[in-house]
């Protein structure tokens, strides 16, 4: 499926008749699911087109949320390794809904980041959170790394 992201050539290999893709952040091959396909394209977009430092991004970050272990799809850290952005991916056939935003908001109750992003590879939403006012400001585009002011 064509995504609304710049094309990349993924490193794919097969094992036991299943496809695996090389994840440049985890530096290993992982199962290529529709959601993983979106993640790989989106991470590449952030690094190559929005100038996000590869060394400050991490995939599948474990957090404890309400006494339950959860995994954030991607987290951006600042240079002091404090989380700054949570990115949640869905497969392209999954509509981004209030449920998606509720999920990422639950993660943010633990991490307290100023930036939230959701993408299904076709649609992308980014918001900045004013922590003092508790307000969400939705942006028209994913910001360049340097404009995040972190």
Image (cartoon, grey):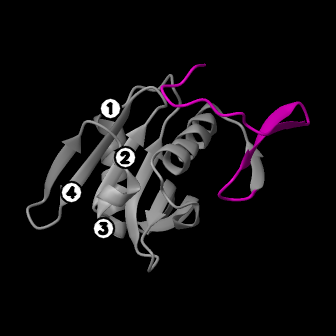
The question of residue 16 being in magenta is answered with yes
In this rendering, the label closer to the viewer, 1 or 2: 2
Secondary element at tag 1: loop
In this rendering, the label closer to the viewer, 1 or 4: 4
Name the quadrant containing residue 6: top right
Residue 148: image location, x then y, percent: 31, 59
Q: What is the C-alpha distance between the residues marked 1 and 3?
A: 21 Å
Residue extent of the magenta highlight: 1-27
Q: Is 9 above or below relative to 40?
A: above
Local packing at callout 3 (Cα closer than 10 Å; few below 14, some 14-19, many 20+) is some
Q: Residue furthest right?
A: 16
Reading the chain from its start, which is encountered first: label 2 or label 3?
3
Q: Which residue is mark 4?
A: 129
Determine whether, in the image, residue 111 is placed left or right of residue 121: left
Determine whether, in the image, residue 91 is placed left or right of residue 107: right
The secondary structure that dominates the magenta segment is loop
Checking the image for residue 112, the label placed there is: 3
Secondary element at tag 3: loop
């Amino acid at each position: 499926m064509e995504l609304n992201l710049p094309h990349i050539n993924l490193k794919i290999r097969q094992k036991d008749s299943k496809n695996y893709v090389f994840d440049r952040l985890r530096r290993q091959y992982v199962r290529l699911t529709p959601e993983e396909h979106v993640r790989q394209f989106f991470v590449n977009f952030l690094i190559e087109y929005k100038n996000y430092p590869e060394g400050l991004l991490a995939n599948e970050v474990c957090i404890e949320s309400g006494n339950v272990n959860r995994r954030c799809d991607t987290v951006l850290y600042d240079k002091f390794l404090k989380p700054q952005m949570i990115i949640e991916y869905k497969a392209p056939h999954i509509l981004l809904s209030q449920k998606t935003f509720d999920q990422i908001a639950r993660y943010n109750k633990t991490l307290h980041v100023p930036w939230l992003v959701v993408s299904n590879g076709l649609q992308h939403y980014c918001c900045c959170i004013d922590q003092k006012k508790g307000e969400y400001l939705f942006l028209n585009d994913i910001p360049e790394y340097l404009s995040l002011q972190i």
